[in-house]
Image: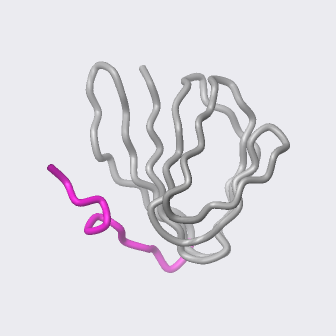
Amino acid sequence: MKNIKKLIEYPREGILSKEVLMDEKVDVTLFCMAAGTEIGDHTSTKSGFVHVVDGKGSFNLEGDDIEMIPGVFIPMKENAVHSLRAGENTSFLLVLNK
């Protein structure tokens, strides 16, 4: 068992990622983004979801803006174009299916 909130560690700038779980079915990574950090348009070859744990930001999924606040769950299909920006220190779990 892991307490995700205790794993949160914000860098002064940029992104810190921590592997939470990797097995034959799923990869789970905790991302901690410093305020003002952006990740431009990109895709993933795997389907999955983002679950916001802490902070506030903006997630763009295939042209739709989604507010990133704690508790928000964002499902993504494989190859979906997405980007994000942390308005304040923001952490989220990225879960990708294998």
Q: In this view, does 5 lie above or below 79?
A: below
On the picture, is 43 further left or further right than 11? right
Residue located 19% across and 54% down the image: 2
On the picture, is 41 further left or further right than 19? right
For the view shown, which residue lies furthest in the front direction?
71
Q: Is residue 4 above or below residue 14?
A: above
Q: Where is residue 46 in the image (x, y as percent from the top left)?
A: 55, 23
For the view shown, which residue lies furthest in the left direction?
1
Q: Position of residue 80 (x, y in %)?
A: 71, 30
The image's colour scheme reads one colour
Residue located 43% across and 74% down the image: 10
Q: Quadrant of residue 64?
A: top right
Residue 58 sits inside the magenta stretch: no
On the picture, is 60 further left or further right than 20? right
Q: Where is residue 39 in the image (x, y as percent from the top left)?
A: 68, 54
Residue located 29% across and 33% down the image: 22
Q: Is residue 94 above or below residue 32?
A: above
Most common SS among magenta residues: loop
Using the image as rendered, state which of residue 64 and residue 8 is in the foreground: 64
Residue range (magenta): 1-13
Residue 2 sits inside the magenta stretch: yes
Count of numbered circles in the view: 0
Using the image as rendered, state which of residue 45 and residue 76 is in the foreground: 76
Q: In which quarter of the image is the C terminus?
A: top left
Residue located 76% across and 44% down the image: 41
On the picture, is 42 further left or further right than 6? right
Q: Position of residue 74 (x, y in %)?
A: 59, 43
